[in-house]
Amino acid sequence: MYAVIESGGKQHKVEKGMTLPVDLLKDEPGTKITFENVLLYVDDKNVEIGQPYLSNVKVTAEVVDVVKSKKISILRFRRRKHSMTKTGHRARHSQVEIKDIKLESK
């Protein structure tokens, strides 16, 4: 059984028990959250596709940690001007563990 959820403008395929990084959430580590923007739900017997979202499927998760991603180097070079700037950026992500995927009867 798996589902496709939307978080932070990105789509994630999730299964029960998996841990994934999503864009930074306001919630503190240890907080239980519910993803209600579910686009697709698949189990052994049926497949449900939302248009655009499924109202009867909820994905519950727990925020495990806040982590930083790999550093991205940005080099700004201006030719013939003797000018160059190098900067970096590390985005912060919330590490989320999927606890349950629930299909509620209609």
Image (spheres, rainbow, N blue to C red):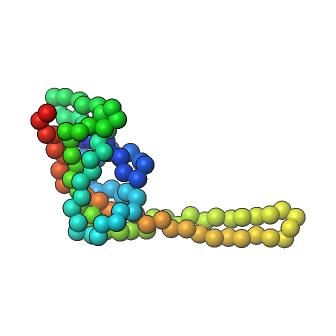
Q: Is residue 77 left or right of residue 18?
A: right
Q: Classify the position of the C terminus by image quarter.
A: top left
Residue at the image point whose x is 80% and y is 63% from the top = 78
Q: Can residue 1 be seen in this view?
A: no
Residue placed furthest toward the left: 105
**Percent from the top left, x then y, of residue 36?**
26, 47
Residue 23 higher or lower than 30, as above or below: above
Q: Which of 36 and 1 is in front in this view?
A: 36
Q: Classify the position of the N terminus by image quarter.
A: top left
Q: Nearer the viewer, residue 80 or 51?
A: 51
Q: In this view, does 49 lie to the left or right of 103?
A: right
Residue 84 higher or lower than 20, as above or below: below
Q: Is residue 106 visible?
A: yes
Residue at the image point whose x is 37% and y is 57% from the top = 22
Residue 97 higher or lower than 59, as above or below: below
Q: How many labels does the image show?
A: 0
- Write down the quadrant of residue 75 in the picture: bottom right
**Percent from the top left, x then y, of residue 65?**
31, 68
Residue 48 higher or lower than 78, as above or below: above
**Percent from the top left, x then y, of residue 42?**
23, 35
Residue at the image point whose x is 23% and y is 66% from the top = 31
- Write down the quadrant of residue 62 in the picture: bottom left
Residue at the image point whose x is 16% and y is 28% from the top = 45
Residue placed furthest toward the right: 80
**Percent from the top left, x then y, of residue 57?**
21, 41
